[in-house]
Image (cartoon, helix red, strand yellow):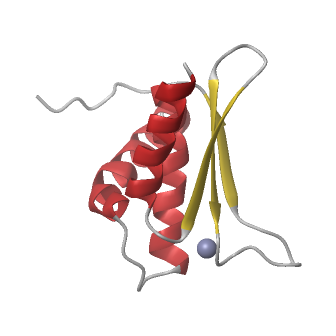
Amino acid sequence: MVASRSARERKAAAEAGPLATVRIEVGPDEQFVYKISCSECTSAKGSWSAYRPGEDNGFMAAMDRWTFHLHEKHPGAEAPCLAYLPEAQRRLHERRGQRDDPGPSSTEA
Ligand SMILES: [Zn+2]
Protein backbone atom coordinates (compact mmCIF):
# COMPACT_ATOMS: atom_id res chain seq x y z
CA MET A 1 0.00 0.00 0.00
CA VAL A 2 2.62 2.51 1.11
CA ALA A 3 4.94 1.54 -1.73
CA SER A 4 2.27 1.95 -4.36
CA ARG A 5 1.29 5.31 -2.94
CA SER A 6 4.83 6.69 -3.08
CA ALA A 7 5.29 5.19 -6.53
CA ARG A 8 2.18 7.03 -7.69
CA GLU A 9 3.43 10.17 -6.01
CA ARG A 10 6.75 10.00 -7.84
CA LYS A 11 5.07 9.32 -11.16
CA ALA A 12 2.64 12.21 -10.70
CA ALA A 13 5.45 14.53 -9.63
CA ALA A 14 7.47 13.60 -12.69
CA GLU A 15 4.54 14.36 -14.97
CA ALA A 16 3.59 17.57 -13.22
CA GLY A 17 7.06 19.05 -13.69
CA PRO A 18 9.44 21.02 -11.46
CA LEU A 19 6.96 23.70 -10.39
CA ALA A 20 4.56 21.25 -8.80
CA THR A 21 4.58 19.68 -5.41
CA VAL A 22 2.56 16.50 -5.49
CA ARG A 23 1.32 14.79 -2.41
CA ILE A 24 -0.92 11.80 -2.12
CA GLU A 25 -2.71 11.33 1.13
CA VAL A 26 -4.98 8.53 2.17
CA GLY A 27 -8.40 9.77 3.14
CA PRO A 28 -10.51 8.41 5.99
CA ASP A 29 -12.32 6.10 3.57
CA GLU A 30 -8.99 4.64 2.40
CA GLN A 31 -9.04 6.33 -0.96
CA PHE A 32 -6.18 8.38 -2.30
CA VAL A 33 -6.41 12.14 -2.17
CA TYR A 34 -4.29 13.93 -4.74
CA LYS A 35 -2.89 17.33 -3.89
CA ILE A 36 -0.90 19.32 -6.38
CA SER A 37 0.42 22.70 -5.34
CA CYS A 38 2.34 25.30 -7.24
CA SER A 39 5.70 26.28 -5.79
CA GLU A 40 5.64 29.65 -7.58
CA CYS A 41 2.15 30.59 -6.50
CA THR A 42 2.76 29.91 -2.83
CA SER A 43 2.96 33.16 -0.98
CA ALA A 44 1.42 35.17 1.85
CA LYS A 45 -1.38 36.10 -0.53
CA GLY A 46 -2.38 32.50 -0.85
CA SER A 47 -1.37 29.47 -2.77
CA TRP A 48 -2.67 27.57 -5.69
CA SER A 49 -3.46 23.93 -5.27
CA ALA A 50 -5.72 21.27 -6.65
CA TYR A 51 -7.23 18.79 -4.27
CA ARG A 52 -9.14 15.80 -5.58
CA PRO A 53 -10.08 12.58 -3.85
CA GLY A 54 -10.44 9.35 -5.74
CA GLU A 55 -8.28 6.83 -7.48
CA ASP A 56 -7.56 7.36 -11.15
CA ASN A 57 -10.43 9.81 -11.60
CA GLY A 58 -9.06 11.99 -8.83
CA PHE A 59 -5.59 11.83 -10.28
CA MET A 60 -6.89 12.82 -13.68
CA ALA A 61 -8.99 15.71 -12.36
CA ALA A 62 -6.16 17.10 -10.26
CA MET A 63 -3.66 16.76 -13.09
CA ASP A 64 -6.03 18.43 -15.56
CA ARG A 65 -6.46 21.40 -13.25
CA TRP A 66 -2.69 21.60 -12.79
CA THR A 67 -2.12 21.44 -16.54
CA PHE A 68 -4.52 24.36 -17.07
CA HIS A 69 -2.81 26.32 -14.30
CA LEU A 70 0.62 25.82 -15.85
CA HIS A 71 -0.67 26.72 -19.29
CA GLU A 72 -2.39 29.91 -18.10
CA LYS A 73 -0.04 31.19 -15.41
CA HIS A 74 3.35 29.85 -16.37
CA PRO A 75 3.49 29.80 -20.16
CA GLY A 76 7.25 29.36 -20.18
CA ALA A 77 7.26 26.38 -17.88
CA GLU A 78 7.96 22.93 -19.16
CA ALA A 79 6.34 19.80 -17.83
CA PRO A 80 5.52 16.43 -19.35
CA CYS A 81 1.83 16.87 -18.45
CA LEU A 82 1.57 19.80 -20.89
CA ALA A 83 1.64 17.23 -23.65
CA TYR A 84 -1.81 16.18 -22.48
CA LEU A 85 -3.25 19.71 -22.58
CA PRO A 86 -5.48 19.03 -25.61
CA GLU A 87 -6.85 15.93 -23.91
CA ALA A 88 -7.43 17.81 -20.68
CA GLN A 89 -9.27 20.55 -22.59
CA ARG A 90 -11.39 17.99 -24.34
CA ARG A 91 -12.30 16.35 -21.03
CA LEU A 92 -13.22 19.72 -19.57
CA HIS A 93 -15.30 20.48 -22.62
CA GLU A 94 -17.07 17.14 -22.36
CA ARG A 95 -17.82 17.64 -18.69
CA ARG A 96 -19.20 21.12 -19.40
CA GLY A 97 -21.19 19.86 -22.36
CA GLN A 98 -22.77 17.19 -20.21
CA ARG A 99 -23.75 19.73 -17.59
CA ASP A 100 -24.98 22.56 -19.79
CA ASP A 101 -26.56 20.61 -22.58
CA PRO A 102 -28.77 17.68 -21.64
CA GLY A 103 -29.58 17.05 -25.28
CA PRO A 104 -28.29 14.18 -27.38
CA SER A 105 -24.58 13.74 -26.86
CA SER A 106 -22.35 13.97 -29.86
CA THR A 107 -20.36 10.80 -29.98
CA GLU A 108 -17.45 10.49 -32.31
CA ALA A 109 -16.81 7.01 -33.59
ZN1 LIG B 1 1.47 28.74 -10.31
* x 39%, y 43%: residue: 91
Above or below, 70 against 96 in this view is below
* x 22%, y 29%: residue: 107
User: Which residue is the extreme one toward the left?
Assistant: 109
Where is residue 15, by image quadrant? bottom left
Quadrant position of the N terminus in the picture: top right
Of residues 6 and 100, the one nearer the viewer is: 6
Above or below, 46 against 11 in this view is below
User: Which residue is the extreme one toward the front?
Assistant: 3
* x 45%, y 60%: residue: 67
Can the viewer see residue 102?
no
Of residues 103 and 83, the one nearer the viewer is: 83
Q: Position of residue 78 (x, y in %)?
A: 36, 75
* x 50%, y 75%: residue: 72
Is 72 situated left or right of 82 in this image? right
Quadrant position of the C terminus in the picture: top left
Of residues 100 and 64, the one nearer the viewer is: 64
Can the viewer see residue 54?
yes
**Figure quadrant, ligand 1:** bottom right
Where is residue 83, by image quadrant? bottom left
Is 61 situated left or right of 21 in this image? left
Q: Position of residue 105 (x, y in %)?
A: 33, 28
